[in-house]
Image: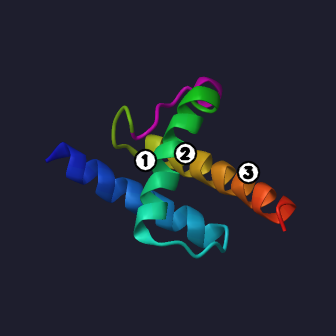
């Protein structure tokens, strides 16, 4: 049951990140972006903000840190996509 909640929260975070970055992606991409964004945030942002990610707990702080990690990941991916055209 917890994995379903985790995937649902990841889908919502990924959707919000793709909406903020004006990147239209499908549900699977949204989940992948949020999960990878959570790991990115856990490695780089959690020590700065002293807040975990959705990998640790579901709170407003962890939601926001994961969202920020997802947005950073999308920005990095956008740079690579533009460079390949």
- Badge 1 marks a residue whose secondary structure is helix
Residue at left offset 41%, top offset 63%: 28
Q: Which residue is mark 1?
A: 60
Dot 2: few (<14), some (14–19), or many (≥20) neighbours within 10 Å? many
Mark 1–mark 3 distance (CA, rounded to whole Å): 24 Å
Dot 1: few (<14), some (14–19), or many (≥20) neighbours within 10 Å? few
* Vertical relation: 52 (above or below) 18: above
| Magenta part of the chain | 47-54
> Does 65 sit left or right of 58 as displayed?
right
Return the residue nearer the eye: 79 or 6. 79
Q: Earlier in the sequence, mark 1 or mark 2?
A: 2
Residue at left offset 53%, top offset 72%: 25
Q: Residue 36, how many percent across, how many down? A: 52, 44
Mark 1–mark 2 distance (CA, rounded to whole Å): 16 Å
Q: Residue 63, how many percent across, how many down? A: 45, 48
Q: Are marks 2 and 3 in contact (CB under 8 Å)?
A: no
Q: Which residue is mark 3?
A: 76
Residue at left offset 66%, top offset 56%: 74
For residue 10, the mark is: none
* Vertical relation: 39 (above or below) 81: above
Q: Which residue is mark 2?
A: 37
């Amino acid at each position: 049951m917890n994995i379903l909640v985790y995937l649902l929260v990841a889908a919502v975070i990924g959707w919000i990140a793709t909406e903020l970055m004006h990147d239209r992606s499908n549900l699977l991409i949204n989940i992948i972006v949020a999960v990878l964004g959570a790991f990115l945030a856990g490695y780089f942002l959690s020590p700065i903000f002293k807040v975990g990610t959705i990998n640790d707990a579901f709170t407003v702080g962890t939601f926001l840190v994961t969202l920020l990690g997802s947005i950073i990941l999308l920005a990095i991916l956008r740079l690579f996509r533009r460079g390949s055209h």
